[in-house]
Amino acid sequence: MTSEELARATVLRLRAAGHQAYLVGGCVRDLVLGCQPSDFDVATDARPDRVTELFERSEQVGAHFGVVLVRENSSQVEVATFRSDSSYSDGRRPDQVHFETDPRQDVLRRDFTINALLLDPETNQVLDFVGGQDDLRRRVIRAIGDPGRRFQEDHLRLIRAVRFAARLSFEVDPATMAALKRMHGLIANVAAERVRDELARILTEGGARQGFELLDQTGLLGDILPEVAAMKGVAQPPEFHPEGDVWTHTLLLLEKLRNPTVTLAMGALLHDVGKPPTFRVADRIRFDGHVEEGVKLAHGILARLRFSHEQTGQIEALIAHHMRFKDAGRMRESTLKRFLRMENFAEHLELHRLDSLSSSGKLDSYRLVRSRLAECGAEELKPKPLLTGNDLIAAGYAPGPAFGEMLAAAEDAQLEARVRTKEEALALVRAEFGAPV
């Protein structure tokens, strides 16, 4: 049973038990737009205890807020009791909720009109108490009621407005935009993990360029990512970057993202984050050490936003190696093969392609690397070592710091086909490092 089938079956069962029930929220928005929703939610006048009574495979995941998770095989649906909210003293959760029997009251507490539609799955009739259907037709993101109040209730709605506008290619309603610009500083009160998740969705759901332009226009960018905001107005040498400053270059990369991973998208966003602090004018505009500075700045950003250790490592690697492609044609064979076998190399290659298309437009290095990658199989890129540390010990060498250099030299020669056997590798070590003492 799919999530949609489970959601519709859940509505029918609640109704058969004498309750009101509808599909609600983002799934209705997506269905009206002709898109397939990723998940489904149900709103009902049934209280949480009643929902768990009716559905054997269910559990209360937010009893205070009236939320029950109903499961069937691998599918699940959130079922929430109609409610109205009181004040939000922490800028995230209501201090008190009141369960309601009128779906209109439930709708009025929600964030944006396009997310406040109810759908009767039996008749396909949409219940719209806030003009959400008109806003979908007008392609507008509009807060329900007073925008300032909505953003004061839950500060994360500030960035969610941007995400929905970017994902759907909608405009933000003028009154909602005015409130965004006035209240953007409240985002500083939101947990880093929640901000991170919204940023990741802006970058990966489509419309990343529009999303970051809106973050800039509202003031949110300076609050969340001042290091990225610093890219604006930082000139680049026109012979290499005819597109303009670092900010424009970065926006062009974001515009070209197509269903990226979070790590690739963050790599695209931050690959030149080290340029603003390293900008100088000599014989031309230069950014000496911008890669190293970029890795350092990215580490602080990713730690601040609570990215995982694994994600942080890959994003930093993307930044650290993004300038190496220009040297691919001059690399030693062993150096090139080590480059090509880096973990998640496909992301490095795609970042380079986007970087090139967003500047000079030349793809010579990209084509060269892709061609060599196609020529080299996994065994050629990372063959079984001819020499190990145990082999060196057996040959009479004492373990120590030089072991790493010896093994690396042997592997270089192996990758370059200068040695093909253990004996040849040992002979190379003796020639370069001397016989064992």
Image (spheres, rainbow, N blue to C red):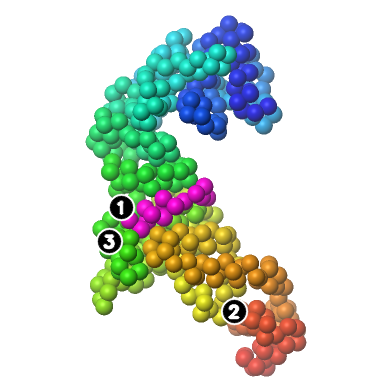
Quarter of the picture containing the C terminus is bottom right
Evaluate whether residue 199 shows in this view.
no
The label number, if any, that marks residue 234 in the structure image: 3
Q: Position of residue 107 (x, y in %)?
A: 41, 18
Residue 68 lies in the magenta stretch:
no
Q: Position of residue 277 (x, y in %)?
A: 30, 64
Find disc 1 in the rendering and name its residue. 229
Q: Are marks 3 and 1 in contact (CB under 8 Å)?
A: no
Q: CA distance from mark 3 to mark 1?
A: 10 Å
Callout 2: SS: helix
The residue at 46%/72% (across/down) is: 326
| Residue type indicated by callout 3 | Val
The label number, if any, that marks residue 333 in the structure image: 2
Q: Are marks 2 and 1 in contact (CB under 8 Å)?
A: no
Furthest residue to the top? 18
Callout 3: SS: loop
Q: Which residues are magenta?
A: 248-261
Give the dominant element type of the magenta stretch: helix, strand or loop: helix
